Image: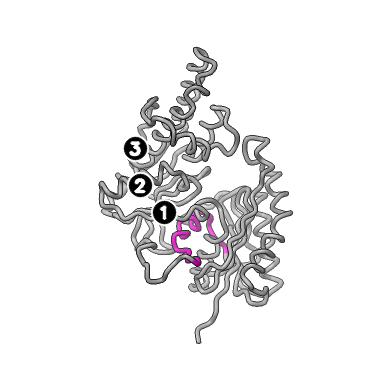
């Protein structure tokens, strides 16, 4: 009889404290504790985030174990996010994982947060069916990874053979969404609110310039500046401009960001002759992006893969599944491992 492999996954890269249990590749529990303290500041405050992680980490892991019906003594290994992320936040998850693994004398597995987002496509939960292989991308595939801190096009040849073929040279797409929302006076996090209001607006109501960046790379800093100037100019003429045109503004800026993302993704797919296309990261929860991908799949014959909403945003299930595949390779790390705020996908 084959050995039972149970992985505890821990994620603490930003402002969500999460723990998950995976047994033989099957997700049992995925617990996430969000932090509401940052809303008053319009963005994540690193010091407050690390303090909240310290408060949340033990209850979250305890809940994950209890809901899974798993004892600590049954865990095969602990997988944790080593980076990239906020140093204080990463320290909490890393320190807990190291202490937990040391106390139980079990292996420790480091996970790159961005690699976790990509491998979220391989999470099998209670609604998954082993025979339904169409739900999982086959290698090689392209993954557009979009979040508040990253925008990358990744060529995925295997679970651990990934190459970034395009990325932002300045700001991330998620940051552009949040900055646009902040300029409009929307509360943090603003990206989901732009998505909400965009559903009622006209995406062609206002036109914003798109950056001309070579090859497969992105740039969003110029778009953010252009959007700010546009709003300031319009408000100077009409103080109620934002309130009167909120839906159209949101629809137009969202349309522009998505078109920038898709233009490079289409080019990458053509250059690499790949029709297996996946998205990952927090912004992949955006309904406009998802709808556009569905339209392109019909036009270009793509087979697209979009994670469930709960696996788009930061979660521990993606860390646990990455840890599971690393466990199969016996790819472990040491107690001397330190968190890395900057952690390249290819390193």
Q: Which residue is mark 2?
A: 293
Contact between marks 1 and 3 (CB within 8 A): the answer is no
State whether residue 113 is above or below residue 199. Answer: below
Q: Which residue is mark 1?
A: 306
Residue 110: % across, % down: 57, 62
Q: Identify the mark nearer the N-term, 1 or 3.
A: 3
> On the picture, is 258 further left or further right than 4?
left
The residue sitting at 51% across, 65% down in the picture is: 321
* Magenta residues (range): 110-126
Residue 129: % across, % down: 42, 69
Front label number (1 vs 3): 1
Q: Quadrant of residue 97?
A: bottom right
State whether residue 235 is above or below residue 158. Answer: above
- Spatial CA distance of label 1 from label 3 is 27 Å
Q: Which residue is mark 3?
A: 214
Which element type, helix, strand or loop, lies under badge 1? Answer: loop
Can residue 333 be seen here? Answer: no
Q: Quadrant of residue 264?
A: top left
Q: Give the farthest residue toward the front.
A: 200
For residue 109: magenta?
no
Residue 46: % across, % down: 66, 43
């Amino acid at each position: 009889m084959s050995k039972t492999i149970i992985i505890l996954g821990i994620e603490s890269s930003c402002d969500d404290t999460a723990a998950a249990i995976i047994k033989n590749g099957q997700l049992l529990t995925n617990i996430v504790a969000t932090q509401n303290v940052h809303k008053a500041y319009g963005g994540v405050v690193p010091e407050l985030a690390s303090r909240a992680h310290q408060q949340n980490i033990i209850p979250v892991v305890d809940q994950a174990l209890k809901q899974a019906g798993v004892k600590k003594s049954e865990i095969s290994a602990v997988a944790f996010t080593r980076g990239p992320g906020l140093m204080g936040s990463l320290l909490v998850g890393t320190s807990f994982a190291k202490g937990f693994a040391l106390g139980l004398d079990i292996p420790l597995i480091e996970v790159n947060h961005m690699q976790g987002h990509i491998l979220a496509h391989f999470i099998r939960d209670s609604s998954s069916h082993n025979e339904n292989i169409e739900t999982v991308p086959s290698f090689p595939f392209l993954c557009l990874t979009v979040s508040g801190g990253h925008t990358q096009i990744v060529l995925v040849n295997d679970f651990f053979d990934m190459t970034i073929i395009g990325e932002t040279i300045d700001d991330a797409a998620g940051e552009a969404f949040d900055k646009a929302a902040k300029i409009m006076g929307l509360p943090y996090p603003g990206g989901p609110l732009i998505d909400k209001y965009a559903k009622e607006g006209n995406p062609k109501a206002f036109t914003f310039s798109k950056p001309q960046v070579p090859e497969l790379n992105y740039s969003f800093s110029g778009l953010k500046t252009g959007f700010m100037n546009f709003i300031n100019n319009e408000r100077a003429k009409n103080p109620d401009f934002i309130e009167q045109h909120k839906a159209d503004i949101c629809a137009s800026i969202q349309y522009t960001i998505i078109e920038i993302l898709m233009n490079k993704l289409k080019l990458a797919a053509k250059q690499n002759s790949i029709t297996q296309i996946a998205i990952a990261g927090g912004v992949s929860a955006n309904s406009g992006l998802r709808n556009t991908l569905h339209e392109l799949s019909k036009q270009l014959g793509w087979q697209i893969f979009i994670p469930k909403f709960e696996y788009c945003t930061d979660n521990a299930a993606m860390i646990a599944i990455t840890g599971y595949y690393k466990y199969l390779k016996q790819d472990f790390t040491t107690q001397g491992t330190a968190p890395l705020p900057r952690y390249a996908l290819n390193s």
